[in-house]
């Protein structure tokens, strides 16, 4: 039998680090990555034939569970008619119409092939629209790997960020201001100082890339007000939260209207689709209408669009989000109860089909608080769960995802495994 270890050793010869995206290499938890052979519903199976209950869900897209038959059929049918045309199709219009109809902040939308492309394009658009150079982002929020976004905070307020990746010259992030999430005063002071130069604020409105963090009351409202007051563009990066935390993303949960929104993950149903959109007057600046260039050979790819449309149709079923939220709540409530029973400091939080697990007494409210949770305890928990067939995200800084196929039996099995793992943590 070919083992995961065999495949990893082989992969490392031709693929840097053996993976095509770094977190997959298990570096922050140790051990051998599982090479997935197939997936169905809430389960994935690795190269050794072992089954796992999956809470990664392809990092968000698999909201219907893996390989939903309707989505697979839609992909197969689209593929028969051709894989890519480089010309417009009616299905793209339907996807655009669906997104515009469902998300309050969207008047027009452009399809791309990844979340990174969506945020990179939205920022270029905000800069082109305002004629200003600077952007504000928040520590711990991830918006993909465009150069100007690979940056961490400098040593003090109003210092510009430092690149977090080699290959990004400091000049490339010289216009990126990095502030603390949930610190509205910091944003206020930055606007007071640099308001005329700030093109946009980009924010994960409920971050899932420093584990799950919720916005403090008034934080998102404050961003909206400050952007309006200073003529800056407010970008909600809903690549993760869009159609995940509820039928209208965070904009639906809060009633706040960003000027631009970025999307990905769920809207492609597991195929490569991203999107950016928002106010029609801003979107009118995008080529070919306006001077902001943006393009893509595979943008609006017919097979990917078919997967997205099938997914969006299924998640519109009455009661879908109620059920998804209930199952996620059962998971986090159960985990909290088991941790209390075992006596391990632990907290958990959820919104819609997204959750966070923290080895800390309280749910963290900032990146700094997340970094103070017990990362070693997480690693032990992760490995013990994996050994018993439950696959959580292989990092203490990632949110988890529940699908509509995570039924009561799946959650109950997860909780039993987790209790066992918590005993291991306790030692
Ligand atoms: N924005 C957010 C909020 C994300 O979570 C991600 C990916 O995890 C991205 C952007 C980048 O998306 P992609 O990996 O599709 O490029």
Image (cartoon, grey):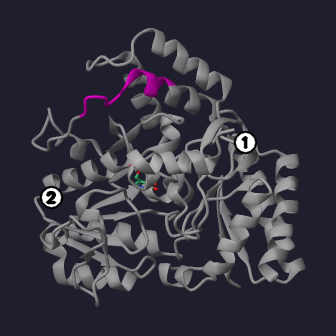
Q: For the residues marked 2 and 1, what is the alpha-carbon distance in whole angstroms?
A: 46 Å
* Rendered view: 417 above or below 174: above
Q: Residue at x 26, y 18 (%)?
A: 87
For label 1, being within 8 Å of ligand 1 is answered no
Magenta-drawn stretch contains 165:
no
Q: Report x, y in % for residue 252.
A: 53, 52
Name the side, left or right, on which 358 lies relative to 292. right
**Dot 2 lies on which element?**
helix
Name the side, left or right, on which 63 lies relative to 361. left
Q: Is residue 84 visible in the rendered structure shown here?
A: yes
Query: Around disc 1, counting alpha carbons within 10 Å, would you say few (fewer than 14), some (14 to 19), or many (20 or more)?
Result: many
Q: Which residue is mark 2?
A: 130
Closer to the N terminus: mark 2 or mark 1?
Answer: 1
Q: Residue at x 18, y 84 (%)?
A: 193
Q: Nearer the viewer, residue 213 or 82?
A: 82
- Location of the N terminus by quadrant is top right
- Location of the C terminus by quadrant is bottom right
Magenta-drawn stretch contains 303:
yes
Q: Residue at x 16, y 73 (%)?
A: 170
* Rendered view: 426 above or below 411: below
């Amino acid at each position: 039998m070919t083992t995961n270890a065999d495949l990893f050793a082989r992969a490392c010869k031709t693929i840097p680090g053996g993976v095509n995206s770094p977190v997959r290499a298990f570096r922050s938890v140790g051990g051998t990555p599982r090479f997935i052979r197939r997936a169905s519903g809430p389960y994935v199976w690795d190269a050794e034939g072992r089954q796992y209950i999956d809470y990664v869900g392809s990092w968000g897209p698999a909201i219907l569970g893996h390989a939903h038959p309707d989505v697979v059929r839609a992909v197969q049918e689209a593929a028969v008619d051709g894989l890519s045309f480089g010309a417009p199709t009616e299905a793209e219009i339907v996807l655009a119409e669906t997104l515009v109809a469902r998300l309050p902040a969207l008047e027009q939308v452009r399809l791309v092939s990844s979340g990174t492309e969506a945020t990179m394009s939205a920022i270029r658009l905000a800069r082109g629209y305002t004629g200003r150079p600077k952007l504000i982002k928040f520590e711990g929020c991830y918006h993909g790997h465009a150069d100007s976004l690979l940056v961490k905070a400098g040593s003090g307020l109003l210092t510009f960020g430092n690149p977090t990746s080699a290959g990004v010259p400091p000049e490339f992030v010289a216009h990126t201001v990095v502030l603390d999430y949930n610190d509205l005063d910091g944003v206020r002071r930055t606007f007071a100082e640099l308001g005329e130069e700030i093109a946009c604020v980009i924010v994960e409105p409920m971050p899932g890339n420093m584990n799950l963090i919720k916005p403090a009351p008034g934080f998102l409202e404050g961003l909206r007000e400050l952007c309006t007051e200073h003529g800056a563009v407010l970008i909600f990066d809903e690549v993760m939260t869009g159609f995940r935390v509820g039928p209208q993303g965070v904009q639906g949960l809060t009633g706040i209207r960003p000027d631009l929104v970025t999307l990905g993950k769920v809207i492609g149903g597991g195929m490569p689709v991203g999107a950016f959109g928002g106010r029609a007057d801003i979107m009118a600046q995008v080529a070919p209408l306006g001077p902001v260039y943006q393009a893509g050979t595979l943008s609006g790819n017919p097979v990917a669009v078919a997967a997205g449309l099938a997914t969006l149709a299924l998640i519109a079923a009455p009661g879908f989000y109620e059920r998804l939220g209930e199952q996620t709540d059962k998971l986090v409530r159960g985990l909290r109860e088991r941790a209390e029973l075992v006596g391990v400091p632990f907290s958990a939080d959820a919104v819609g089909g997204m959750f966070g697990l923290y080895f800390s007494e309280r749910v963290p409210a900032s990146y700094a608080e997340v970094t103070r949770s017990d990362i070693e305890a997480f690693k032990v928990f992760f490995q013990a769960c994996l050994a018993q067939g439950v696959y959580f995200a292989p990092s203490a800084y990632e949110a988890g995802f529940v699908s509509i196929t995570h039924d009561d039996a799946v959650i109950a099995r997860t909780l039993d495994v987790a209790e066992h793992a918590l005993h291991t943590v306790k030692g």
